[in-house]
C-alpha cells in the first residue's frame, strides 16, 4: 500500500498579528507529509533549489517521509509570502515566486508508479497532471488547488478535475472556481466536472464533505490559541488521505472518519508557527484529539417529538 504526494516544497515568509517567520520550511507537500506520516508512510515528489535547507527535510525523514523523489535543481526554491488579517480569517498573498518549479519536469522513480493513494497537492495543475500520467492504477486521487492557479490556469485545472476522485479546497476557492457564492451550488458545479466528492474546508468553522445526494459536516477543534493558519489545509489533507491509506478503504464510512482525522490535523497545524504545531504530536496525541471529536459531535438519541 503506498501513499504519494506531489506539491510545493517551499520557503514561507508569513506575517500574522502574533508574529512572523522568514524563509521557514513550508509548502503544500511538506505540511501534507508531516500530518499524513502520523498515519501512514509518505513518498514525496517535488523540487527544491540549491538554497534549500535540505537537512531540515532530512530531520523529518524518521517520521516515515521519503524525500527521495524531491529533485535538487540549480536555482531558487519556491517562495511564498503571505499576511493574515487580525482575526486570522483571511490572508493576502504578498508574493509567489515559483523559482525551480517554473521549469520542473517531475519524473517518478520507477518503483513509485504503483502508488495507490495519491494526493495532488497545491501546485501548477500541469505538474499535477504530469504526475498523474505516470501512475499506473491509482485507487484514490485527491487534489487540492489555490486561487493562484484557479485564476491563472483554469483550463488545465478543469482538465485535471475530470481525472480526480476528490477535490479538496477551501470555501473561497470553491466559490472562485465555480463562480457561485453559494457553497452548495458551487459544490454541484464542481461535481458536474468530474470529482465524485468535494471536501470544502472552512477554517475555524470546520469542513463539509459534499456528495451528489448528501452532505456531511465536521467542526474544527475548538482552540483557544491560534497562531498561524498556514498549512492547515494541507495538514487537513494529510489527515484525510493518510487515514484512508491506513484503513485501506475508500468507503463512505471511512471517508467520514477521515474527515475527523483531517480536522484534527488542521487543528495541530494552526497551534504553532510554521511546522511547530506538530512538535510533540504523536499517535497518542492524535488519538486523544480524535476521541474529543466524538464528544464534540455526539447527539444523544431522544424520543421523537410527534
Ligand atoms: P494552506 O495554508 O494549506 O493553503 O497552504 C499554505 C502553503 O501553500 C504554504 O506553505 C505555501 O508555501 C504553499 N503555497 C502558497 N501558494 C502556493 C501556490 N500558488 N502553489 C503551491 N503552493 C503554494
Image (cartoon, rainbow, N blue to C red):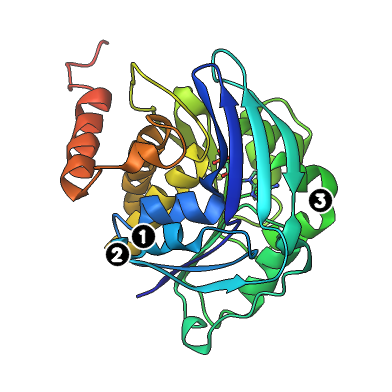
Instruction: Please tell me whether mark 3 sits on a helix, a strand or a loop.
Output: helix
Q: Respond yes or no on whether mark 1 lies under 8 Å from ligand 1.
A: no
Q: Is residue 304 left or right of residue 12?
A: left
Compare residues 27 and 25 and report the one nearer the observer.
25
Q: Which residue is mark 3?
A: 154
From the top left corner, tell me how far across and down residue 244 is, in percent.
36, 58
Q: Which residue is mark 1?
A: 59
Q: Respond yes or no on whether mark 2 lies under 8 Å from ligand 1.
A: no
Disc 1 from disc 3: Cα separation: 36 Å
CA neighbours of label 1 inside 10 A, class few (<14), some (14 to 19), many (20+): few
Tell me what residue is drawn at x 69 percent, y 50 percent: 192
Q: Give the quadrant of ligand 1.
A: top right
Disc 3 from disc 2: Cα separation: 37 Å
Say whether residue 49 is visible: yes
From the top left corner, tell me how far across and down residue 145 is, in percent.
65, 48
Q: Is residue 301 left or right of residue 213?
A: left
Tell me what residue is drawn at x 46 percent, y 23 percent: 204
The vertical placement of 218 against 299, above or below, is: below
Q: Is the C-beta separation of discs 2 and 1 under 8 Å?
A: yes
Q: In which quadrant of the rendered image does the N terminus lie?
A: bottom left
From the top left corner, tell me how far across and down residue 120 is, in percent.
58, 60
Viewer-side label of 2, 1: 1
Instruction: Please tell me whether mark 2 sits on a helix, a strand or a loop.
Output: helix
Q: Which residue is mark 2?
A: 62
Amino acid at each position: 500500500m503506498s501513499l504519494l504526494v506531489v506539491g510545493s516544497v517551499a520557503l514561507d515568509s508569513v506575517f500574522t498579528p502574533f508574529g512572523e517567520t522568514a524563509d521557514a520550511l513550508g509548502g503544500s507537500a511538506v505540511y501534507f507529509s508531516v500530518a499524513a506520516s502520523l498515519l501512514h508512510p509518505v513518498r514525496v515528489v517535488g523540487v527544491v533549489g540549491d538554497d534549500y535547507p535540505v537537512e531540515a527535510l532530512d530531520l523529518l525523514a524518521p517520521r516515515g517521509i521519503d524525500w527521495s523523489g524531491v529533485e535538487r535543481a540549480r536555482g531558487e526554491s519556491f517562495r511564498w509570502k503571505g499576511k493574515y488579517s487580525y482575526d486570522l480569517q483571511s490572508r493576502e498573498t504578498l508574493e509567489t515566486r515559483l523559482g525551480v518549479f517554473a521549469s520542473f519536469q517531475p519524473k517518478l522513480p520507477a518503483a513509485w508508479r504503483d502508488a495507490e493513494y495519491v494526493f495532488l497537492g497545491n501546485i501548477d495543475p500541469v505538474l499535477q497532471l504530469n504526475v498523474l500520467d505516470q501512475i499506473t492504477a491509482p485507487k484514490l486521487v485527491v487534489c487540492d488547488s489555490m486561487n493562484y492557479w484557479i485564476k491563472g490556469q483554469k483550463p488545465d485545472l478543469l482538465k485535471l478535475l475530470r481525472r480526480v476522485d476528490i477535490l479538496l479546497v477551501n470555501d473561497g476557492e470553491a466559490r472562485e472556481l465555480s463562480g457561485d457564492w453559494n457553497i452548495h451550488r458551487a459544490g454541484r458545479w464542481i461535481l458536474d466536472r468530474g470529482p465524485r466528492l468535494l471536501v470544502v474546508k472552512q477554517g475555524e468553522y470546520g469542513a463539509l464533505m459534499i456528495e451528489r445526494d448528501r452532505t456531511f459536516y465536521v467542526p474544527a477543534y475548538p482552540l483557544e490559541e491560534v497562531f498561524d493558519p498556514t498549512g492547515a489545509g494541507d495538514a487537513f489533507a494529510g489527515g484525510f488521505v493518510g487515514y484512508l491509506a491506513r484503513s485501506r478503504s475508500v468507503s463512505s464510512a471511512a471517508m467520514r472518519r477521515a474527515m475527523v482525522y483531517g480536522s484534527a490535523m488542521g487543528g495541530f497545524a494552526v497551534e504553532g508557527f510554521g511546522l511547530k504545531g506538530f512538535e510533540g504530536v504523536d499517535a497518542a496525541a492524535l488519538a486523544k484529539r480524535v476521541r474529543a471529536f466524538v464528544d464534540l459531535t455526539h447527539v444523544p438519541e431522544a424520543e421523537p417529538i410527534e
